[in-house]
Image (tube, helix red, strand yellow):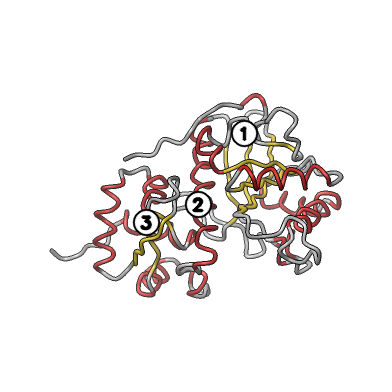
Amino acid sequence: MTFQFNRNDFGLLSFLTQARALTVTQLAAFQKRERQVVRRRLRALSEEGLIQSDTRAFGKSRGRPEKIIHLTEKGIDLLRSKLPELEDVPNNWLDAPSHHSLDHQLLVNWFRIHLNAVGEIFSQLSVRVISPLFPLPGREPPAANGFIDPLRRKGVKAFAPDLVFSITHNEKKKTLLFFLEADRGTESAAGVSRGKGDIRKKILNYRQCFQTGEYKSYETILDCRLNGFRLLFLTTSSTRLGSLCNLVKSMSSSDFVWLATVDQMFSAGLSAKIWFRGGKQDTAQESILGSEFARSAPLLLKE
């Protein structure tokens, strides 16, 4: 049978331009389709040379091997012919990330999948992702190429968030700005040299942005008034969480930092009271959405 490239295929490949790599489970969750259906279509796309799949142990169950899907050069060329905004984007921004950064990217994917669920669960709330550069199909276009300039203007590489997004209360017309740092424990909490891989330095950079009001540059993009922001650290273990909480708690003016683990996110959802504000593990956990929308809503994945 002759291969026919359809609209769903275009949407599927478009996901990969922003995530660069996805597991089959993640792709099914993004598209709200059964995994078996997604697998069948991926097989056809792979046979056409548009995608490549590799087996790697990662996922909600740590030891279970999953297929990692990413674009091939042929797939990138096809998308570039259909998406003018990709014309000047280099291939190494779109193809598979390095093995060193793959698990980090997959963690960001899981956060974004859970974030999408927030807007679906609460009709009063609207979620808008400002970065990465390429939004999900059917969602708002990205901001101009300087979308992250408020945080990178001074050339501090450690100050590039893994995700920037906002949540708006539609009735109250109030918007909260969020920055995500997906932490896999590869950076020191507070190294002796306090270089670019130092979590403490990273938090200080965000705090400077908070205190100087540089984050208000996002008001133009979001067309709203902003009164601060929340910095989220999502980490992979309770041990690492404790270490980062101790660090944050020891720092002054760090109440804008919220911390949780990926296991807590899977167990209860982003809207639940899973977050330690200001690193204070001796106080009750809170919801990043506030008490009005604090609800346990774990993600239900289709088999």
Residue at the spot 62% in from the left edge and 42% down from the top edge: 238
Expressed as whole percent of the image width and height from the top left, the position of residue 88 reads: 52, 75
Is 158 situated left or right of 26 in this image? right
The residue under the point 61% across, 57% down is: 143
The answer to whether residue 85 is visible is no
Q: Which residue is mark 3?
A: 12
* Callout 1 touching callout 2 (CB < 8 Å): no
For the N terminus, the quadrant is: bottom left
Give coordinates of residue 17: x percent, y percent. 46, 63
Amino acid carrying label 3: it is Leu
| Horizontal side, residue 193 vs residue 302: left or right | right
Q: CA distance from mark 3 to mark 1?
A: 32 Å
Dot 1: what SS? loop
Indicate which label's residue lies in the foreground, 3 or 1.
Answer: 1
Q: Image height check: is 106 above or below 172?
A: below
Label whose residue precedes the other's in the sequence (3 or 2): 3
Mark 3 crowd level (few <14, some 14–19, many ≥20, 10 Å Cα): many
The type of residue carrying mark 1 is Ile
Q: Residue 72 placed where, x, y %? A: 37, 71
When the figure is inspected, residue 68 is found, relative to residue 178, above or below; the finding is below
| Residue highlighted by disc 2 | 109
Residue 48 appears in the rendering: yes
Marks 3 and 1 in Cβ contact (< 8 Å): no
Q: In terms of secondary structure, where does tag 2 sit? A: helix
Looking at numbered disc 2 in the image, what kind of residue is underneath it? Asn
Identify the mark nearer the N-term, 3 or 1.
3
Residue density around tag 2, few if under 14, some if 14–19, many if 20 or more, within 10 Å: many
Give the residue pinned by disc 1: 274
State the quadrant of the C terminus.
top left
